[in-house]
């Protein structure tokens, strides 16, 4: 692969990986520890990822259990979860915090599937913007004694790359939508 194309391939890969990580945080009826990925706990004045202040387990299909390394952190973890967009009220027994996920209603499943589609579209727009930036950069190469044929070949390769990433995004959206809509 041409060095000039590798830059855009890397950017498209990052856009795809971001979308993939974003989809992990969408809950689909089953308890998924990744819904806690964006939560930060105030740990002695420092916002710290929740995974670094306790052990996170999934003892049952619809429950996440958080066992903090220090008992004094229970209140801080609860506060962080309540302030987040997880939408679940934590309960604790003094030693561990439990998050019980309710069954998703049909309406909620459909709204989550719509959200997934919208995020997928945003991902495709990001990939297309990267393609546009690449094509603009390739057009400027004409001033640097690069032949029109070479520029056309670079643009064609970039289009193939774009098509591949868009197909991957569509597949990811379909899989996540299916996961959400499956009862």
Image (cartoon, rainbow, N blue to C red):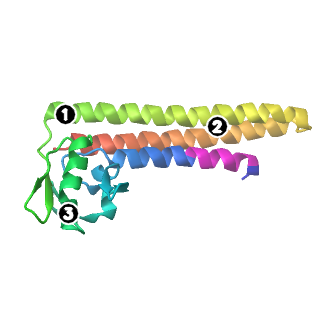
Task: Please tell me whether the stretch drawn in magenta is mainly helix, strand or loop.
Answer: helix
What residue is shown with label 2?
159
State left or right for residue 129 relative to residue 80: right
Question: Does 129 appear in magenta?
Answer: no
- Image coordinates of residue 11 in percent, x first then y, are 60, 45
Q: Could you tell me how far apart the alpha carbons at marks 3 and 1 are, in whole angstroms?
A: 35 Å
Q: Residues within 10 Å of mark 3 (few under 14, many from 20)?
A: few
Residue 72 is labelled as 3
Disc 2 secondary structure class: helix
Q: Could you tell me how far apart the alpha carbons at marks 1 and 2 are, in whole angstroms?
A: 37 Å
- Image coordinates of residue 130 in percent, x first then y, are 62, 36
Task: Name the N-terminal-most of marks 3 and 1.
Answer: 3
Task: Name the N-terminal-most of marks 3 and 2.
Answer: 3
Whether residue 53 is visible here, answered yes or no, is yes
**Residue 78 versus residue 143: which sits nearer the camera?**
78
- Image coordinates of residue 4 in percent, x first then y, are 74, 46
At 34% from the left and 52% from the top, the residue drawn is 37
Outermost residue, front side: 45
State left or right for residue 152 relative to residue 76: right
What residue is shown with label 1?
108
Disc 3 secondary structure class: helix
């Amino acid at each position: 692969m041409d060095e000039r194309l590798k830059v855009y391939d890397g950017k498209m890969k990052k856009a795809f990986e971001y979308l993939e990580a974003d989809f992990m945080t969408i809950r689909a009826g089953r308890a998924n520890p990744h819904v806690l990925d964006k939560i930060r706990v105030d740990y002695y004045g420092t916002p710290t990822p929740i995974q670094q202040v306790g052990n996170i387990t999934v003892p049952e299909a619809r429950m996440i259990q958080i066992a903090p390394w220090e008992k004094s952190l229970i209140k801080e973890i609860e506060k962080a979860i309540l302030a987040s967009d997880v939408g679940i009220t934590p309960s604790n027994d003094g030693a561990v915090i439990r998050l019980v996920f309710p069954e998703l209603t049909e309406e909620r499943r459909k709204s989550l599937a719509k959200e997934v589609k919208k995020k997928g579209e945003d991902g495709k727009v990001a990939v297309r913007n990267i393609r546009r930036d690449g094509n603009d950069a390739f057009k400027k190469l004409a001033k640097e004694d690069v032949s029109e044929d070479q520029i056309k070949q670079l643009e064609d390769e970039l289009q193939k790359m774009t098509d591949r990433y868009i197909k991957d995004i569509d597949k990811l959206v379909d899989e996540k939508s299916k996961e959400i809509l499956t009862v």
